Amino acid sequence: MIKVYKFGGTSVGSVEKIQAIADRIMSEPNNQHVVVVSAMGHTTDQLVELCSKISTTPEPREYDALISTGENVSAALLSMAIIAKGGKAISLNGSQAGIYTSNGHKRAKIMDVRPDRIQLELNENKVVVVTGFQGVSEFNDVTTIGRGGSDTSAVVLAASLGLKECDIYTDVDGVYTTDPRCVSQAKKLSVVSYDEMLELASMGAQVLHPRAVECAKENGITLHVRSSFSSDEGTRIKELNSMELNRTVTGIALKRDEAKISVVGVADQPGIAGKLFGELGNHNVNIDMIIQSNEQENETNTITFTVSEDDYEDAKKITERVAKELGAGHVVGDTSIAKVSIVGVGMISKPGVAATMFKTLGECGVNIQLITTSEIKVSCAVESGQADVAVQALHDAFELHNAK
Amino acid sequence: MIKVYKFGGTSVGSVEKIQAIADRIMSEPNNQHVVVVSAMGHTTDQLVELCSKISTTPEPREYDALISTGENVSAALLSMAIIAKGGKAISLNGSQAGIYTSNGHKRAKIMDVRPDRIQLELNENKVVVVTGFQGVSEFNDVTTIGRGGSDTSAVVLAASLGLKECDIYTDVDGVYTTDPRCVSQAKKLSVVSYDEMLELASMGAQVLHPRAVECAKENGITLHVRSSFSSDEGTRIKELNSMELNRTVTGIALKRDEAKISVVGVADQPGIAGKLFGELGNHNVNIDMIIQSNEQENETNTITFTVSEDDYEDAKKITERVAKELGAGHVVGDTSIAKVSIVGVGMISKPGVAATMFKTLGECGVNIQLITTSEIKVSCAVESGQADVAVQALHDAFELHNAK
């Protein structure tokens, strides 16, 4: 049976860890192995630093040629380690592995995967070690595919080889009901749906990049997130029907680095929100939650929204400028905001989940500043200092210590 | 005009040096540039060390995949630096540059160079930065071409582009009459013949690898060895007719790390030298000088030869075993040997040069232990402690302080 899996940067962070991976692979001689690797530990960061000394806006093609060498090193070393232990192995770079991408460097899109060489080497009973994160353009140039690249590489290779599952080995042993550093009763989940994972990943649970999850969803590949350092089962991310699941809330996500901006005294007329968020969008500021409230007495509105803390200064300046142009009142900012979310496909068929959330937060004295909802998620912006209390209370309320 | 040149590891050893090279290239906007680069400073050594922690006998294909990344990094950085300064540039790896090699990894032979892509990029007015030391096999695998690789890469690229000259930028400013650290009056030579350079290179003047010189000779490419840190003319290595040259001795080479082994009391019968040197050859011991002397009184011979100090222990053991088998007397070793050589194509047409050498050494009290000669070289093994005196005396005797 062919197995495709990926080892991340910390998993290949030293010669000893690389040798441990080699041992692990060789303990399954009856399978055919395609192993996708990231660059060792901080290699990529070091290359980025070297690069930044030469240019703050490096030429993207050259940036890719530089940055991709980190994966070449780890792939060659793992292959060498397997051979040194008496196995058969070969390392393939993005081009050799047949990962064809668009010509857009730094965040190229994977256009096609032709695993002819991989298949050839597998037929020779070799472990095939593939460099993650990279591909080749139509001009035969090395490309990199951006954030979450190696996970995505593994998923597309699994799909191209006709597989239904792909293992992602990482430094955590699975996806938890919430961050175990925050709530000690947090439980590892055995299964999570793609959509749940997307909500959890984009809100701070950085086990898997959303892009890899999207890609797995599109291709119907089950992702198995598990620990590089143990053989325990991890968490499977797959298509789940909400009816099958006997759970309402799957997990609680926390994003700490949020900021809130309010424009007070906005005239109640059409086009104002469009003008404001259009300007912010033009400056690449990502808006998260938005709320508009009407003040009856003077017939003006207050528009409040959240952005990530990184974007706060930019966003505040742009908002102040637009507010002035629109003759709005004043702009108020607050950087001590956190976003707490409950996520679960089970919510779709069970009413009252949001109400339970609000009631729970109220009972423990947490003031809800903004609310947004989607089919499988309810998010509340709260004061940063209350975030941990909020997460703990919700974990208890939805009985996630009993999750599995 | 297209120019091909190579910058060695120390020349690209830091971001600052890479930027200096970029400035240098951009100061000649009217030429088309093909720049071959080695890996930065000690990068290759670091990769070799990483590799040695995994295997003492690394798989050659994987070794090449690993080691070649050093040149990818320096090529991308140089290209990036040129672009950051407002120029146009592109880095090409061995495959992209069209350097096709045999499948023999670690020391692949260059079979063909097809500079289509290089020509294409030159036509776009880009500086083309090519990774030295690497090529691609018929299986689309990265190969490395062994010691002296980057110099050889530059020479074959120059040949493939129809050029007659190739600049080798290095950390010395040319080829000297002898090592300037040894003789302060040593002079930089403006021209040296290929054959002289081969003799000088293989005997310790490590400016250029013999392989690159051979390759330049075969292709009729003039090599211009010069300093990365100045714009002075260096030394040109080219075909020279001995008749054209008004000089007898071009330079004096010194190799310090030699060792001598003598087998005393060898029966005067055929086949003995064959047996001894056959055995040494089987064990990859390179023999340098050989002398056989006959002792009249007891009708036995003494066979004396030199090896590099690295091979001494092995060579001595093998010689002792063979001597025993042949019933020879005893084996004597001496590791304090140096080899001093005078080199010059001018010797061919001028008799008495060797005699001048022997007389000079005699006059300053240097005892000659062994002698070998070729058409353009006379070498003497002397006691290590006398090597500097010998080189200085010969430099004076052949008036090399007047060389140019």
Image (cartoon, coloured by chain):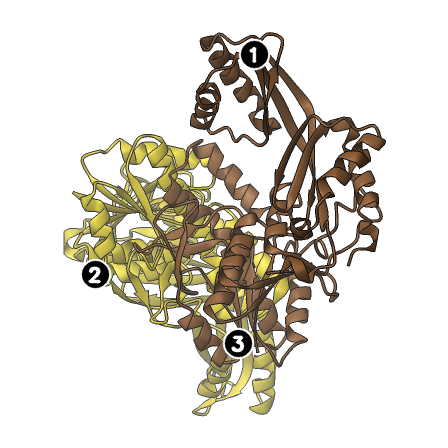
Chain colours: A yellow, B brown
Of tags 1 and 2, which is closer to the observer? Answer: 1
Query: Where's the N terminus of chain B, which quadrant?
Result: bottom right
Chain letter belonging to callout 1: B
Q: Amino acid at mark 2?
A: Asn
Question: Between residues A319 and B226, which one lies in front from this camera angle?
Answer: B226
Badge 1 marks a residue whose secondary structure is strand
Badge 2 marks a residue whose secondary structure is helix
Residue B232 rendering spot, x and y as whole percentages: 75, 65
**Crowdedness near tag 1: few (<14), some (14–19) or many (≥20) residues, C-alpha within 10 Å:** some
Chain letter belonging to callout 3: B
Residue A379 rendering spot, x and y as whole percentages: 39, 62
Marks 3 and 1, how far apart in space?
A: 70 Å
Circle number at residue A219? 2
**Label 1 belongs to which residue?**
B300
Question: Between residues A318 and A65, which one lies in front from this camera angle?
Answer: A65
Answer left or right for B74 relative to A131: right
Tell me if label 1 and label 2 are in contact, CB under 8 Å. no
Query: Does A382 sit above or below residue B66?
Result: below
Answer left or right for A389 relative to B297: left
**Label 3 belongs to which residue?**
B126
Asked if badges 3 and 1 are on one and the same chain, I answer: yes
